Image (tube, rainbow, N blue to C red):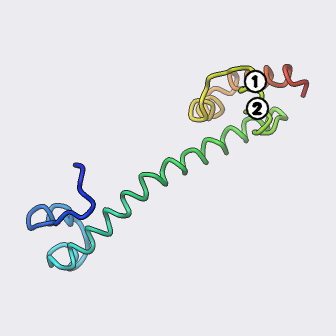
Amino acid sequence: GTARAAGMVLKGARLAGLAKGFRGRAKNCLRIARLRVEKALQYQYRDRRARKRDFRSLWVQRINAGSRAHGVKYSQLMAGLREDNVQLNRKILSDLAANEPGSFGALVHRVKAMRGL
């Protein structure tokens, strides 16, 4: 998509293009289409931000499940990694927990040894 001003005026062909695929009169009746497109753009803006929260939440759940399998809580693991200056973000840690259990286990054991868990 293109950058749009907050109070832009949607016209004709542009509006029809944005309303393509909508159901009923929302795709071909300009007045209704304009309302539906404006609401759709609001949802789009809101959900781009919500997606970031959702993914972070998913990563935390995966890391927590992986670390608890080794007897360490998520918060203990993250604090230990921070102390040890391990520069891996939650996305990468989550991927390791899911797809590379050996590597993830090595990280957890490193934290356990360092913190005496």
User: Between marks 1 and 2, how big is the CA–CA gap?
Assistant: 6 Å
Residue 10 against residue 66 in the figure, above or below: below
Which residue, given by chain and number where applicable, does mark 1 sit on?
A: 83
* Depth order, front residue of 72/81: 81
Pinpoint residue 109: horizontal percent, then vertical percent.
80, 22
Residue 93 against residue 20 in the figure, above or below: above
Disc ID at residue 57: none
Question: As drawn, which residue projects farthest toward the right?
Answer: 116
Q: Residue at x 14, y 76 (%)?
A: 30
Quadrant hosting residue 10: bottom left
Pinpoint residue 17: horizontal percent, then vertical percent.
15, 61
* Depth order, front residue of 44/83: 83
Q: Amino acid at mark 1?
A: Glu
Q: Secondary structure at mark 1?
A: helix
Is the residue under label 2 in contact with that under label 1 (CB below 8 Å)? Answer: yes
Is residue 29 left or right of 61 when viewed as pictured? left
Label 2 Cα neighbours within 10 Å, binned few <14 / some 14-19 / many ≥20: few
Q: Residue at x 54, y 51 (%)?
A: 54
Residue 40 against residue 58 in the figure, above or below: below
Which residue, given by chain and number where applicable, does mark 2 sit on?
A: 79
Q: Secondary structure at mark 2?
A: helix
